[in-house]
Amino acid sequence: MTKGRPILVLLCLFTMVFLSGCWGAKEPDELGFILYTGVDKVEGNLLEVTFGIAVPQAGGAEGKGGKSERELEIVSVNAASFYGAVQLANAFVSRDLTFLHNRALIFSEEVAREGLEGYVNTMIRSRELRRNTFVLVTNGKAKEFIASNQAILETYPYRQMEFFLEGKKFVGFIPHSNLNMFYKALKSPGEEAITALCGVNDGKGRGIITDKEGEIIQEIAYLPGEIPRQGGNKIDIIGTAVFRGDKLMGYLNGNETRYYQMVKGDFQSAMITLPDPENKERLLVIVLKVELGRPPTIKVDLKGENPRIQIDLLLEGEIISTQSSTNYESGVEKAELEQYAGSIINNEILAVIQKTQQEYQSDIFGFGDHTRSFFWTWSAWEQYNWSEKYPQAEVEAKTTVKIRRTGLKIRTSPLPEVKGGEGP
Amino acid sequence: MDNNKVKIGYYEVTAIILVLIGTKAFTGFPRFIVEAGLTAGWIIILESGLLSIALWLLISALLFRFPGKSLTQINNLVLGPAFGILANLIFLSYITINNSNLLRLFSEAVILTALPEAPVSSLTFLFIIPALVAVHIGIEAIGRSTYIALPFIVIGTISVLAAIYPFMDHWQLLPLFGSGVGTVLTHGLLSVSGFSEVLILAYFVPYFSFDGSKLRRLGIFSIAVSTLAFVLIVAVYLMVIPVPGAQENIVPFYQLSRMIYLGRYFQRVEAIFILFWTFTAFLWIALGLAVIAIIVRDMLKIPYYRPILPALSTLFVSIGLTPADFMQSIEIEKFILGTIGWQFTFIPPCVVYMLSLLRKKGGRVKHDQG
Amino acid sequence: MKEEKDKRGNKAAPASQTGLLQKLAKTLKLTLTYQEKRPGESFVLSGTNDTLGKKENHRSPQKTRKVLRRIPPVIPGKSGMEKGDYDWRKLRVDHQLAVNKTILEEIYSLPKNKDIIVRDFTIALDPPLQAFAIFVEGLSDKEIINNAVLKPLMILTRLEKEEKISDVASYLKKRILHGNEVEILDQYDGVLERVNYGGTAVFIEGIAKCLAIETKGWDKRAVGKPEVEQVIRGPHEAFNETLRSNTALVRKAIRSETLITEMFKVGARNKADLAIMYLQDLANSSLVEEVKRRITSIQTDFLGETGILEQFIEDHPFMPTPQMLSTERPDRVASFLIDGRVAILIDGNPNVLIVPITIFSLLHSAEDYYLRFPYGNLIRILRTIATFLAIMIPGVYVAITTFHQEMIPTDLVLAIAASRETVPFPTIFEVFLMEFAFELIREAGVRIPGIFGNTLGIVGALILGQAAVQAGIVSPILIIVVAVTGLSSLAISNYSMSFALRGIRFIFTALAAVMGIFGITTGLFILITSLSGMKSFGVPMLSPIGPRTISEPDIILRGPIWSMDQREDYLETKDRPRQPRISRGWIKPKGKKEKGGPNG
């Protein structure tokens, strides 16, 4: 039998190999890799699906085939369903379109207001699309967004979206949003979904900074397309799209997104510009780099008539810049600055929460998850219907700012009086 | 039985039982549990794990009454030849149907995850032929490769669970008693068959190269470890893909591995997961085939099992291909694991134990007389 | 008519085909109608005690052959008997010199056979005795023959006159012949054996005995450097083609009286000397018996190479991995002997076989132990990775580029797609093409005469690497894959093992091309399971992890030398500990040291 066994093994191996043929094997050069997918609504209840397909030669190995001008081939197809559009696109795209490397799904405002459930269900079911695909809502047309997105610094266009949504954690105005998070929030009774917000900026952004006291900290309170700037890539990614259920309710601008992230606990760090409390008349500013000292403590109390939400936030800061010669680095001034920054941030946070309560009626902060511990069973919790209760909730917030570092300077000494300094 | 020199060591047997029980984690099992218990899925596992340890204590007491004898032989001794064969047939039919169905599930899952254009029949063949070869080489060899593969499987599983740590949200484990205390407890009782593979230990008794008294400890250890693994997997699954969505995924563990995203350079690694997952599937099918072959051999009292392997694998494939579609196959698995499994697995040996006490059969009685 | 013709043609021509078919049918039949192995065939290495008594019977064949039969001396030329009709070996030495000479002339086909020299002379005794010496030109040392055989017999015998010599042969042996090894033989088989191996036989008139003097001496290679298993640290000594100097090299390393060298003759026609070496107080006796049993049972005409012997005595001839370790390093053989294994040496062969062996020892190299613990482990890790790479890389490349494109980073998948733009073949064909080219270079490199070495480098690097890419036949990324594979398989220290990995690699690549990662898993499953089923002289090939046995820390990684205090459990050696638990005597418990110190 020892003689027969290896022959049997070989026989089985060969049978297996010849039985099968090549199932679904595809050479990488037979595939058209879609990097961006955009969904718009057009006339006649049709979808207009836009694909950004990677052109391999653009970033490919040197030598062969030469470099192509375009890095993305952008095509749009009108069809009744998402996959119908994919099928139709094969009529004029030579390669087999695949979502294996799809980076971002972009929905237009119109589509999002009608509800995204249908699309999200389609995409969650897909073998090719994965749950960590970024989801964005544009405040214009998805097609326009994809068309006007010209990666300038990157040779490889597919890196760009990852840089924006994964790399930019130090600004705080781009929320992390992928398909999984969206789906999770969509299905959960205790949380509402958000996505990152993007749009086209044609260089005619309006400025909204006023010289009024207090509003100076609104310096990033823009929606995409509003940033006053010239040159560069013609897109902006800033702010948050707020959903209730699967329907888009409205937007949070860049500034509000920061405070939303602070409460949510996703906040990494950001530089916040504050008016100088000691030198208000001269319109000087202080820039603080803040980060979360610890995850925010959120307590929800259901005992009263309305739910009560208590938020305790600890921010740790570093002085990045002071324009005045006041010595904020130590002593009373430091305590005052901490106090002042804390109260400003606290008010802003309360304003954002109030906006979601009254304007959008959408608990994007996930306070509802903190009510789970009041219930023993899932059905009891579901029946409590948090999303109805949230708008009436009473919110208290306490923000503490602690300045831990001061950069390379430990002390600001005043200008000599002879040079026009004020002196202590 | 004298010319039979097959001996399996302690570690190999432990690995075999762990793989036999634990492979369920890679099928729809976590989903069944979540469906039954919602956020309290892990309590169900814990409960059925503890219960199966209790049942195993009973069964091992039965085995200790007949040292060195397999459950097949014990059934024959206690119930007599006719009823003994009946008792053996109950477990045999259960495990045959379960194995065949798992063969189908694995094949379908491979289609789903790796080879979307392959026909299911060929994949069942691709699973059964290497299994056939492996069993033909010998149960010893499978035991050894199981022991060798187990650390890799464990490392693979743990690394998947660790890599999705950033997505975990502990709030999703609340409310504590998801679908209600009563439902959770009932399902905990019913899904005890999730650990029924520990019974295979009782059929391997004549092959042990170690002291039979370690049997009880081995069973408890296997159940405990796999309970821990299941609890961990279900809990992580719940934390990453919370409840309403958790009931939706066909292969939960695959979905978890698809979610791995540790920065730009470490993502989309589920194909590596396919590697150790399908390896486990191969082990499972080969072990299942070997177990059935051994039980049939013991039952029919024929000297060796190799001649019946082709017939058994044909049986596997044909039963496996009987369900019309994947969904039906999943329904069957759910029905077996969550509803009727315990009647076919844990109950008969317990009944046999009672009878052996009543009819005063077994080693201890002999000692008393002598 | 036509059909008949076809049938006849079919029947006549492919005899080999039907043979194969029959074989397959037989295999299938055997599979279906399985029969349990006969108990005597398999060998399981188990404990020393129980098997010792059982196997004792096997030793007999060596002895039973020596049944003495008195055969009347015949003079073949006269009786008209043809050569070959009679077994010359059983003849006894005759007392007539002429008869002996005739017999030898007949045996060696003299004077046709020019290698055999017969020298007639007279022994200067009282009375002088006619005698002749016979030896093989080239195999024997002329100096020794002149000084130690002819000179004493012809001249020295004259110096000392003995009064009465009762036994001339033993007198000559005791007093006259001062060669170090002189035997008195009375049968031709012993005479021929010695003459054929460089000895000199002296036949004397009137004495039915023959003096065989050891006069071996031929041109041989000196002990050289290892060619295949080179190390940087460690001895640079290798076996050569002379059995005796090989055994001496081993004995030089193990200066122990328990080191046994047992000699056998193998090959019915070439009668090569085969030696097995083992440590009597370590090696499992049933193992030694099994090695002897397998070796003595071989019946073949020619067996002059350990490679051929390996194929005769291995357990699984059809499995890819070798089941014996072949080495040319005496230090390695010594360390294996100290483990309790058995070494098999054949004369004329610088490769020594070690049995039994496991997969892990095939992947180790001598240098692992000579380097310090961290460095040794570093190269162990490197080599383990290389092993996996050598098997898997082309397969994994094919699997993920054609089935799992999502696994490749987007940058890379686009780069691969771009580089494949001009390639007219599927990936699997590219891989096989380049793998084949690489194997060709490798094979050619072994066979090529040294002068053309440079040419090969140019052809290999330039034409196959650069030109193939520039011609658009293969993609540049693939060259990297093939190069890494090639390097990895060259990093495997054992030559046979690296062959095995090369073969397995092609199977894996084919499986991956058909079924992607799933195919690789299938291959892995069958590979690991069949490896677990393999045995080398009763020891499972994957021990000590499959089956798990107690083992010193030396499987994939190795522990510090002082931690390896036990011999491998699977070898069932007679003496288990290699060194005491605390082998470094200078590390003593602190309290003790203080007490026993010079102050205390």
Image: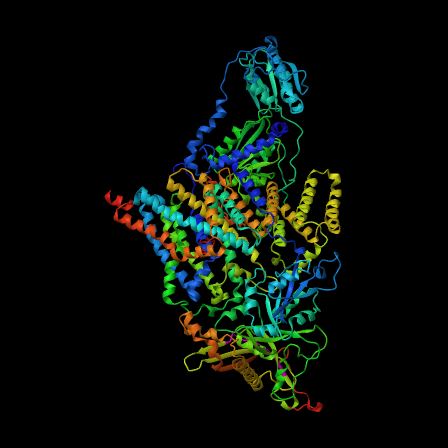
x then y, percent, for residue C461: 73, 47
Describe the colour scheme in one phrase.
rainbow
Q: Residue at x 33, y 50 (%)?
A: B349
**Magenta highlight range:** A286-296
| Front-lying residue, A101 or C466 | A101
Please tell me whether residue C253 is drawn above or below residue B35 in the rendered image. above
x then y, percent, for residue B56: 36, 53
| Front-lying residue, C89 or B170 | B170
Q: Residue at x 45, y 35 (%)?
A: C36
| Front-lying residue, A132 or C162 | A132
Q: Which residue is drawn at 49% across and 19% down?
A: C67
Q: Main secondary structure of the magenta part?
A: strand
Task: Give the left or right position of residue A152, taking residue B6 as reference.
Answer: right
Task: Give the quarter of the figure containing the C terminus of chain A.
Answer: bottom right
x then y, percent, for residue C393: 62, 50
Q: Does the magenta stretch include residue B3?
A: no
* Farthest residue, direction top: C78
Please tell me whether residue C169 is drawn above or below residue B143 in the rendered image. above
Task: Give the left or right position of residue C36, taking residue A157 as reference.
Answer: left
Q: Is residue A293 magenta?
A: yes
Mark yes or no: residue C194 visible.
Answer: yes
